[in-house]
């Protein structure tokens, strides 16, 4: 008998029939003797509908009032799921974030969880109830409703699991786990049974949609075993089978021992590259170039500053393709202040990354990656590395080719 | 400078454009120097949508969970209205019932307000803010969300006005006040500038849709001057004119002094009459007949027990026409226990009522009413009276004729 937190995404909660399916699955786990807490997202489309209403009234919605509105989607979900469980004879009760003391800071629309009071939930679990808690939201010290930002229900689920010292947090979603790379690009892509927390964190920040970065951070901080698995399977599937499906984000040391050098190949297609040519090379150049870009709320990813020649240097960075035109305009406007010769840009570039904790103990991963790409005739524009990740920027037309070649070169199709 | 509570119904809040109109109107009152609290309903259709979802999952929705869901409609409304005010440069803040301590009992879906903590609202009003509070809902002692039942936002508005000792509560709705009778039936129907609390209470319980009965009771208990007025007028109309429009439910004694004998003619079309013939006249006969009807959740209105003849009596009562077939079936099933001879029913009857506090001090109102109906050849089937009301049951085909004749007989077209 274990204490387990289930999280279900918006697609899983997308209709009353699907909510009944979720109830069937949850009841199966409860019937097996486990204490179950469920954190459902809003019904798919609902959060967008609510934000759309807000934007019709205020182009830049007031953050506190937006949270007041956006938090209602999850409130409807928990009530409906509680009813679906009651309807099949299970004792269930729903709570909002404020009702179970999910305290956050006051950074509305992107609040961070500070503490959770587990008293009420524990009492209900001890009484045999299934407890359903709104994801995505909490309450600040002044009693204002706050939300955690998009994908925040993942974070809520892991945080609630940590507060309750749950045995495992199950993130039910519309994919059946974490893959060595996107199966739509590489046929041989393979589901990973386990992945380390650090690898998952890199994959999340590299654009994998499987889990929100902050939820992975939470799992890491609290060493909460977290499993990503499918909610599209038959809800009556045997529990033992389901309990071992998907991908487990693991904190056990032996996991690392048998770890392959590389766990997966990640990529983001829609990148853009901007180079500021002939900018005077003096202290603060990076700040003077990137400050205005950041002020325009544009996130910068890879950054390179060339070796200085004759007191001038070239400065290159990447942004999301959506922000390319805006970033160019910001820099054009700063021409005088920055004193550069010209700006050149390329909005048809992609980023490919190899991720794996095995890199720490294996030399030569970078050189194998560069050799593989060279053999395919793919030019590398930029490189960035971390302890367990190497990313390269390449022409977007070679992206699929690069991913397939690297997947094969690192033997990722083999278990 | 006064403290005024505005309440806006679902139609007034029915779209983002209409919400902007509400904001314009509210801002006008605030600009005039008043402290303003606004209680908006859910956007029209939203509460029905939410209850519909619940019923798809559970035919008889769990009341606590239904309130969790149904309360979100108003939460969205307050956030949107706050934004609409912020967007036009007014300082505004929204709160849910629990955030401003609207404490209710735990009778989910039909909870009653017990207390309101005005601390937070007063502080905001003193700081010049417009305060927007969800109608329809509160929180019980255990922190569960409760709702007040259909039309509960009227009650919330009056209760909040009472707690804040407001100068007036304005109920903005899609009619422009209380009329001497339904203008769709009588062309000469006239809007009443003032009406006494007792008259309004009778009209509400006689089926007038203008105000929920409980909100009128609240207004009475706290002597809260409450005005019903239109939200369909130009929001820029001069404030002085708007402040005197609609109908004021008044508690001033002089109002009664200049009161006409009768203030209005109310009617309900869809009544049905059931007579149990030849039931043994012994103690408890009314209880034995009406007990099973009440157990079937059927509300009984008028009741008559005939003079007993030879130890047998006839017992007649009215129900809403919707409940007619069910009530007949309940009594058929009780034939043996009740020992009656037969049941007869008539589902084509209507009720017409004359209401007015002037009745107290004027004799002969009943006889004038009966004479007027007799002159039109209308037979009276049943009569019931209260201190300020006389109701008669008549054949439904004479209903409009009766209303017009009485409206004229009591000079209601004259101011």
Image (spheres, coloured by chain):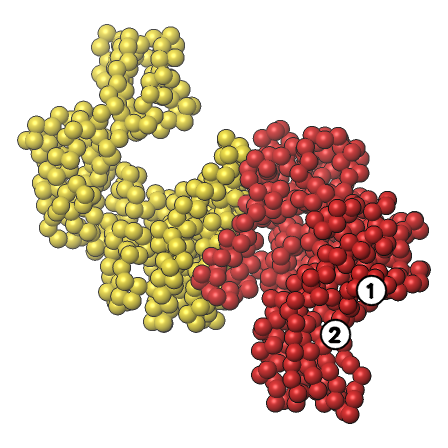
Chain colours: A red, B yellow
Front residue of this view, candidates A6 and B188: A6
Residue A76 location in percent, x, y? 55, 45
Label of residue A303 in the image: 2
Picture quarter with the N terminus of chain A = top right
Real-space CA distance between mark 2 and mark 1, rounded to the nearest whole angstrom: 22 Å
Q: Which residue is mark 1?
A: A374
Label of residue A360 in the image: none
Point 61% across, 85% down: residue: A334
Residue lying furthest bottom in this view? Answer: A310
Front residue of this view, candidates A27 and A270: A270
Image position of A5 (left or right of A18): right
Residue A133 location in percent, x, y? 64, 46
Q: Against A395, is B408 above or below?
A: above
Image position of A128 (left or right of B307): right
Front residue of this view, candidates A354 and B395: A354
- Which of the two discs, 2 and 1, labels the residue nearer the N terminus? 2
Chain label for disc 2: A
């Amino acid at each position: 008998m274990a204490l387990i937190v289930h999280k279900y995404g918006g697609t899983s909660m997308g209709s009353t029939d699907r909510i009944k399916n979720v109830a069937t699955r949850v009841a199966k786990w409860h019937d097996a003797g486990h204490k179950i807490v469920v954190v459902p997202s809003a019904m798919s489309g609902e959060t967008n509908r609510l934000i759309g209403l807000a934007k019709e009234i205020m182009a830049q919605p007031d953050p506190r009032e937006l949270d007041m509105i956006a938090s209602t989607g999850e409130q409807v979900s928990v009530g409906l799921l509680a009813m679906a469980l009651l309807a099949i004879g299970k004792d269930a009760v729903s709570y909002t974030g404020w009702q179970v003391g999910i305290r956050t800071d006051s950074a509305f629309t992107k609040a961070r969880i500070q503490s959770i009071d587990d008293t009420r939930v524990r009492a209900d679990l001890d009484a045999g109830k299934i407890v359903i808690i709104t994801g995505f939201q909490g309450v600040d010290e002044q009693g204002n409703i706050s939300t955690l930002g998009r994908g925040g229900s993942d974070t809520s689920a892991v945080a609630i699991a940590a507060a309750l010292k749950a045995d495992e947090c199950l993130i039910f979603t519309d994919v059946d786990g974490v893959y060595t790379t996107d199966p739509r690009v590489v046929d041989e892509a393979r589901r990973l049974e386990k992945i380390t927390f650090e690898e998952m964190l890199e994959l999340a920040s590299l654009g994998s949609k499987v889990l929100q970065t902050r939820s992975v951070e939470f799992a890491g901080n609290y060493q909460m075993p977290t499993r990503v698995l499918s909610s599209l399977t038959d809800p009556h599937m045997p529990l033992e089978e389901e309990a071992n499906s998907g991908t487990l984000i693991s904190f056990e040391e032996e996991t690392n021992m048998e770890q392959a050098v590389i766990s997966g190949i990640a990529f983001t297609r829609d990148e853009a590259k901007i180079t500021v040519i002939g900018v005077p090379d003096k202290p603060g150049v990076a700040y003077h170039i990137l400050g205005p870009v950041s002020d325009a709320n544009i996130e910068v990813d890879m950054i390179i500053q060339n070796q200085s020649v004759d007191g001038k240097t070239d400065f290159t960075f990447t942004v999301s393709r959506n922000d390319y035109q805006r970033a160019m305009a910001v820099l054009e406007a700063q021409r005088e202040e920055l004193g550069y010769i010209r700006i050149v840009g390329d909005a048809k570039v992609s980023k490919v990354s190899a991720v794996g904790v095995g890199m720490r103990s294996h030399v030569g991963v970078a050189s194998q990656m560069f050799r593989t790409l060279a053999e395919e005739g793919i030019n590398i524009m930029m490189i960035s590395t971390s302890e367990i990740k190497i990313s390269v920027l390449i022409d977007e037309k070679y992206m699929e080719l690069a991913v397939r070649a690297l997947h094969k070169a690192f033997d990722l199709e083999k278990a």
